Image: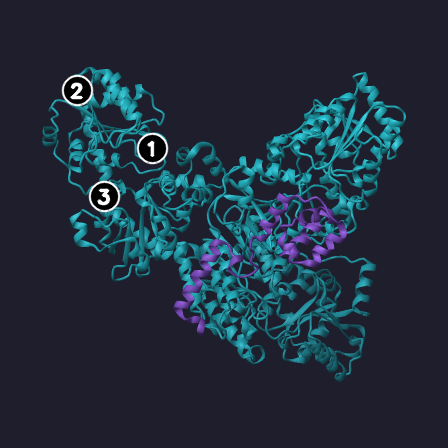
Chain colours: A cyan, B purple
């Protein structure tokens, strides 16, 4: 059973009240107790975005992230403002539509009476539903005290609407017997629909010993100077606070001097003032009454523990949670004898009449002075509190849900139960190809039409209006496509028959405009789409379908393998499936294919209806043989249908030629169908001729329907083989079975689904011996032929009989019309138009409604990995980060994670769009006209912030938060934390900008991924030191970068002066530095060291490669003025990757002098060229290079000069560390490492927010 | 749009590099914001122009992006919006 718990009471205004506490505790207990038995989902409103994380955290260990679902509705909806009424009603409809699409068995709402002052959305019965609805009934106090609570007309209307919703519920969980009885008497509800499910005390309330200091601090905080009588409540008349104050005033003076009266709870200032005025009138002193205001749960528990007496004089309660909380804390509790309070207290001697002030005062005197009585109350309280438990309540609620579910299941035996046929036949547009077109779908349609007539008024929509079937012509209006476009709205039902041939070219566009039920005769539709593109019927039809259905991988395949191979490999049918209101297929194979290509839910609304057979009369065997000149004693094997390599006709021919039948003059092999027009067909003819069997092996060519039936009647055995099935329906097998012909098939595609006893089924990859043996068995065993013939006919009669198929069609079409997601969507739209509200919706409201409906009902399909390439796409600044982005994006596109689709995207103006042009450029593919539309996400999608996109994150934060509420996980790659760790190495303002970016990603991300373990560690340390307001844990991971330059789409080009530079480098040892010239990279130190070395006569070259960065103007000046420039010093800017490769090869060592790095890609690149590495001794360099580098320390020029000298000596002796074995990844491996982190949750650490640590 | 783009470039790349990109003669969107251009000129003076890069930036900047209305919706949401408008118009409910 799928149970959905609507927990808005933990989000809206009620979250801070008893209702919020009750909802959370009961929901937690339900999740705990239902584990392993039922699926529990928790529905939250996206109108309270800041509360989602908090609620999720409250279910740590009880529910997974995917168990939370957020619904989106247009806000604001608080009904106290009449301007919100339309949105409020629309929100109710949209929420109920959202709940329906979750396909729950039971939905439980923890309080219906919400949404007056906040943006909660509650209703039951705004739309037709198929689930059971359950509601917690807390009380009916406003209804029973209308003069107090429903004075405002608007509020009264709101309350009555909610009452109506309440009556629509299937079961009410009353919080007490008292509430249950009130519902029966005040609302006239049947006792059957009411179940008492008591709350319990929150486990945070219990007997606690307080330290002296803590008690003193508490008393001081609330100005409690004496032992005290305690009460908790809010400023409502029913809480009876004036009577409590009067009763306190009537206590003997000695008691009043001994005890203060402490009232905790959030009171309106006017109510506080009134109570103090009353206190004054009653002659009480300033010290006697203490109003604490709102207190924390911790303080509340302490006050319960410390009080001498807890008094609860309320006039009306639904339950009275404070009573139970106080009892759980071991307080002596007395309370009213009205409504639910006696049920909770459970002792008559501890109750009093709340309207009798003297009685109340007397009870208080007894509670304070009768030690025995007070002690008995104190010891009784915890025992009594234990009688109430959340788990017990959850079990009771679950029992109620299960009973409901059983009742509903009994009422609705299957999904067709909700289906209602109208008294007159619905009008149906039947869109198909019809005879005389040479198409299997045309013949199929001609057979199906007579069966549909039983249920529908049919009009036939055809591309060519030439129809040669006299019965069809005389019975039905035949319309063309143009007419249909103008008149489609007149039809109640639309049924499309779609196959993979050009006959169906017009259906794609029609389906988008006029959604209907689609019979999908072929699962793969590439051929028709490719044809449409090639003849310019619809430009880019194939490419668009490939992209929409399968993404860039399919477009790459098209470029590499051509259209024909791509048609065979990819179904290209996603757009059809998305627009169809329901899909009818003939085989389980097609259903399985849908799941394989588009995920497990792709076919959940589909219908599998076997092909129709049995309309055409069977021909007589003797007469047929006579007409076909086949002898009575001949044994004839036939294969029916067009000849094609995929039909394995050559395999049958070879097997037959190798079988004893080839040597027997009475045996014949006949291929009944048109021969393949190409080399394949010629090859078959040549083989027959070469075997000298032209007399007994024939290919008939195309035959008429009559002749076809004669062969079916004349044959002794049929062989129908297949390979590379694309899900098309094997009609010829049905013909052979219908004619009682013993049939041999191989288990390929849908043919594997036939039962074993109706035909002989070879394995999919059969060998010739298997086929020969089967041919011979059928020939030898007449009883087998008879048995298979009878079984085949029986199978067709049971499963493919026209009447049965017609009825199945009716069921499927009506189910789509009334119970499909599309039907529900249409119902929602209609309901939205019928909303009656004082103000009409604005255009913004309608836009919001559209966006919210889309967000609430995700489309089926593979999960997406959205890769943010904003900076690269907008203005590739060509820094190292963009090189990484290009390389990883490319690798991810070429090798997407299993079951995921990789989509590069960019953030712009608060929207996220598909970066199609950029990606096609990156992949070197031809441009298309496919629109770079806004991204639609679904639960389970991943957003990977791969690019360093500070502004995109600023603008896109709210969008990413929305995505997150839709179940998308947000991960961001962190290249380094250098602007924080080395702020002085960056221009002013960089640190602040970086901090803002970090705050933003901490606000929206589920996980951060460093490009090295060192970066991940730095991240953890930064979070520990700086803290964050983030309430949720944060995953921290890392991966390593790749190094193969070709994988990063390298830039090319060698400048003219490169040759002389490279020649100079050959003369002396050359040391190369690679990276933007900026203070952190310590170019100044290296330059200084080389000046010392040159001064000492050391012959060495220094090559500085990299653009001029920031804060290095003086260094650049020094370099420009250096006399060694162009001799032993080379400064190269903006060079291509190709030139850089040559420099690596020409130099002697790489110097990596940076003070810190995120990763240190040049080290890897140097190792690729087997270039030795001289690196500063940093953790990240140790992580990357290990023992394969020479490390130096010290920040002065001399220290480095000495290190270089030492290295030169070691190198001369052949003892310098070699970079040869340095472990390095390709970009493909780097992408795999990254996807292991984000897809397989291979995280390094999980950062916990301080409160939970 | 032009100002926004220039600002992004400045903050992403730092002043000099952004200016190198923006000072291309084809950068029409920068010309539309003389203050930005003047500021860049004051800061840098003439720099070699990476023409093709600038053209690409301009081309991308020229992509019209609306901040409101149906352009903000996904294609499916846009279809729903049109369906809803159509239904509303048919029902005449928006008039009252």
Q: Earlier in the sequence, mark 1 or mark 2?
A: 2
Q: Is residue A46 left or right of residue A334?
A: left
Disc 1 designates what residue?
A752
- Residue for point 15% across, 19% down: A666
Q: CA distance from mark 1 to mark 3?
A: 21 Å
Disc 3 designates what residue?
A801
Chain name for mark 1? A
Q: Is residue A195 visible?
A: no
The residue nearer to you, when weighing A813 against A357, is A813
Front tag of 3 and 2: 2
Is the C-beta separation of discs 1 and 2 under 8 Å? no
Q: Is residue A1021 left or right of residue A475?
A: right
Residue A624 percent location from the top left of the image: 12, 31
Residue A992 percent location from the top left of the image: 76, 52
Q: Secondary structure at mark 2?
A: loop
Disc 2 designates what residue?
A695
User: On screen, A692 above or below A677?
Assistant: above
Mark 3: give few (<14), some (14-19) or many (20+) Cα within 10 Å. some
């Amino acid at each position: 059973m799928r149970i959905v718990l609507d927990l808005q009471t933990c989000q809206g205004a009620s979250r801070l009240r008893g209702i919020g506490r009750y909802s959370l505790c009961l929901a937690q207990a339900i999740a705990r107790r239902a584990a392993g038995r039922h699926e529990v989902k928790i529905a939250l409103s996206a109108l309270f975005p800041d509360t989602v994380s908090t609620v999720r955290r409250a279910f740590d260990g009880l529910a997974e992230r995917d168990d939370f679902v957020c619904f989106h509705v247009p806000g604001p909806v608080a009904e106290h403002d009449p301007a919100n009424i339309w949105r409020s009603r629309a929100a109710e409809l949209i929420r109920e539509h959202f709940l329906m699409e979750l396909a729950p068995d039971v939905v439980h709402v923890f309080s219906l009476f919400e949404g007056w002052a906040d943006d909660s959305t509650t209703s039951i019965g705004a739309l037709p539903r198929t689930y059971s609805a359950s509601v917690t009934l807390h009380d009916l106090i406003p209804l029973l005290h209308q003069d107090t609570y429903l004075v405002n007309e608007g509020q009264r209307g709101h309350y009555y609407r909610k009452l109506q919703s309440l009556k629509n519920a299937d079961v009410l969980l009353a919080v007490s017997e008292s509430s249950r009885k009130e519902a029966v008497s005040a609302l006239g509800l049947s006792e059957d629909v009411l179940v008492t499910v008591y709350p319990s005390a929150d486990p945070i309330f219990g007997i606690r010993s307080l330290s002296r200091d803590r008690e003193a601090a508490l008393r001081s905080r609330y100005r409690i100077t004496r032992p005290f009588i305690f009460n908790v409540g809010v400023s409502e008349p029913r809480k009876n606070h004036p009577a409590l104050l009067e009763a306190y005033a009537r206590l003997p003076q000695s008691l009043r001097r001994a005890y203060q009266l402490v009232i905790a709870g959030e009171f309106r200032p006017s109510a506080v003032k009134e109570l103090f005025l009353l206190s004054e009138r009653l002659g009480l002193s300033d010290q006697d009454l203490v109003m604490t205001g709102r207190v924390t749960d911790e303080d509340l528990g302490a006050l319960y523990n410390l009080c001498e007496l807890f008094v609860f004089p309320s006039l009306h309660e639904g339950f009275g949670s404070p009573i139970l909380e106080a009892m759980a804390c071991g307080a002596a509790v007395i309370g009213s004898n009205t409504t639910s309070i006696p049920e909770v207290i459970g002792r008559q001697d501890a109750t009093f009449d709340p309207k009798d002030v003297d009685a109340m005062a007397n009870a208080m005197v007894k509670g304070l002075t009768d030690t025995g009585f007070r002690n008995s109350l104190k010891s009784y309280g915890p025992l009594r509190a234990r009688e109430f438990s959340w788990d017990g309540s959850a079990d009771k609620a679950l029992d109620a849900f299960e009973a409901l579910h059983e009742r509903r299941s009994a009422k609705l035996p299957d999904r067709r139960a909700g289906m209602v046929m109208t008294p007159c036949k619905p009008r149906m547009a039947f869109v198909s190809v019809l005879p005389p077109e040479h198409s299997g779908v045309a013949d199929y349609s001609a057979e199906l039409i007579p069966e549909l007539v039983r249920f529908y008024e049919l009009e036939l929509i055809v591309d060519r209006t030439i129809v040669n079937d006299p019965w069809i012509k005389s019975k039905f209006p035949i319309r063309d496509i143009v007419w249909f476009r103008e008149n489609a709205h007149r039809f109640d039902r639309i049924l499309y028959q779609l196959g993979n041939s050009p006959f169906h070219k017009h259906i794609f566009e029609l389906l988008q405009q006029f959604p209907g039920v689609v019979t999908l005769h072929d699962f793969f539709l590439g051929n028709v789409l490719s044809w449409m593109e090639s003849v310019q019927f619809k430009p880019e039809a194939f490419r668009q379908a490939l992209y929409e259905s399968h993404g860039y991988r399919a477009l790459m395949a098209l470029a590499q393998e051509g259209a024909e191979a791509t048609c065979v490999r990819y179904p290209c049918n996603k757009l059809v499936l998305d627009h169809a209101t329901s899909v009818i297929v003939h085989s389980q194979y097609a259903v399985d294919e849908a799941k394989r290509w588009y995920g497990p839910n792709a076919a959940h609304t589909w219908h599998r209806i076997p092909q129709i057979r049995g309309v055409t009369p069977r021909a007589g065997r003797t007469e047929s043989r006579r007409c076909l000149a086949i002898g009575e004693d001949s044994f004839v094997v036939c294969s029916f249908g067009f000849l094609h390599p995929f039909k394995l006709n050559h395999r049958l021919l070879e097997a037959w030629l190798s079988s004893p039948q080839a040597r027997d003059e009475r045996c014949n092999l006949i291929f009944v169908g048109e021969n393949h027009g190409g080399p394949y067909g010629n090859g078959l003819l040549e083989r027959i001729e070469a075997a000298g069997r032209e007399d007994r092996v024939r290919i008939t060519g195309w035959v008429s329907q009559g002749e076809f039936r004669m062969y079916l009647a004349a044959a002794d055995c049929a062989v129908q083989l297949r390979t590379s099935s694309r899900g098309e329906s094997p009609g010829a097998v049905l013909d052979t079975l219908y004619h009682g012909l013993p049939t041999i098939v191989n288990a390929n595609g849908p043919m594997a689904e036939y039962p074993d006893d109706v035909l002989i089924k070879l394995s999919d990859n059969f060998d010739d011996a298997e086929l020969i043996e089967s041919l011979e068995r059928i020939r030898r065993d007449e009883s087998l032929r008879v048995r298979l013939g009878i079984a085949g006919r029986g199978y067709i009669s049971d499963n493919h009989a026209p009447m049965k198929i017609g009825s199945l069609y009716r069921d499927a079409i009506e189910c789509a019309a009334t119970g499909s997601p599309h039907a529900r969507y249409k119902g929602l739209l209609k309901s939205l138009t019928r909303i009656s509200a004082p103000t009409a919706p604005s255009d913004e409201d309608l836009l919001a409604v559209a966006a919210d409906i889309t967000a609430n009902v995700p489309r089926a399909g593979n999960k997406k990995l959205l890769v943010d390439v904003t900076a690269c796409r907008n203005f590739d600044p060509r820094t190292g980060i963009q090189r990484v982005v290009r390389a990883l994006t490319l690798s991810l596109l070429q090798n997407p994670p299993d079951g995921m689709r990789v989509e590069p995207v960019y953030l712009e103006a608060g929207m996220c769009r598909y970066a199609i042009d950029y990606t096609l450029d990156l992949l070197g593919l031809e441009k298309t006209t496919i629109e770079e539309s806004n991204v639609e996400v679904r639960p389970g999608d991943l957003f990977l912030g791969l690019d360093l996109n500070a502004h995109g994150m600023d603008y896109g934060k709210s969008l990413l938060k929305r995505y997150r509420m839709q179940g998308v996980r947000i991960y961001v790659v962190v290249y380094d934390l250098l602007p924080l760790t080395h702020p002085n190495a960056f221009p002013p303002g960089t640190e602040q900008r970086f901090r803002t970016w970090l705050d933003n990603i901490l606000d929206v991300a589920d996980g951060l991924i460093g490009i090295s373990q060192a970066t991940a560690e730095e991240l953890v340390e930064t979070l520990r030191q700086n803290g964050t307001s983030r309430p949720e844990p944060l995953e921290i991971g890392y991966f390593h970068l790749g190094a193969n330059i070709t994988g990063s789409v390298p830039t090319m080009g060698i400048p003219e002066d490169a040759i002389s530079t490279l020649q100079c480098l050959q003369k002396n040892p050359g040391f190369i530095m690679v990276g933007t010239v900026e203070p952190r990279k310590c170019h100044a130190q290296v330059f200084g060291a080389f000046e010392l070395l040159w001064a000492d006569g050391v012959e060495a070259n220094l090559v500085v490669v990299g653009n001029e960065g920031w804060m290095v103007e003086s260094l650049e000046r020094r370099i420009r003025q250096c006399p060694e420039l162009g001799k032993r010093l080379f400064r190269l800017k903006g060079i291509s990757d190709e030139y850089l490769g040559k420099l690596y090869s020409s130099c002697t060592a790489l110097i990596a002098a940076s003070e810190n790095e995120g990763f240190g890609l040049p080290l890897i690149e140097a190792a690729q060229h087997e270039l030795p590495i001289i690196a500063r001794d940093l953790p990240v360099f140790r992580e990357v290079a290990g023992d394969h580098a020479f490390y130096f320390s010290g920040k002065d020029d001399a220290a480095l000069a000495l290190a270089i000298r030492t290295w030169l000596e070691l190198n001369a002796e052949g003892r310098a560390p070699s970079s040869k074995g340095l472990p390095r990844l390709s970009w493909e491996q780097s992408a795999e490492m990254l996807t292991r982190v984000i897809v397989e949750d291979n995280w390094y650490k999980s950062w916990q927010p301080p409160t939970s640590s | 749009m032009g100002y926004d783009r220039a600002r992004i470039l400045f903050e992403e790349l730092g002043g000099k590099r952004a200016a190198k990109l923006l000072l291309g003669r084809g950068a029409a969107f920068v010309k539309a914001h003389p203050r930005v251009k003047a500021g860049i000129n004051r800061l840098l003076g003439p720099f070699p122009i990476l023409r093709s890069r600038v053209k690409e930036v301009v081309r991308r900047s020229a992509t019209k992006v609306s901040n409101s209305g149906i352009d903000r919706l996904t294609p499916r949401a846009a279809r729903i919006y049109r369906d809803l408008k159509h239904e509303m118009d048919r029902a005449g409910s928006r008039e009252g």
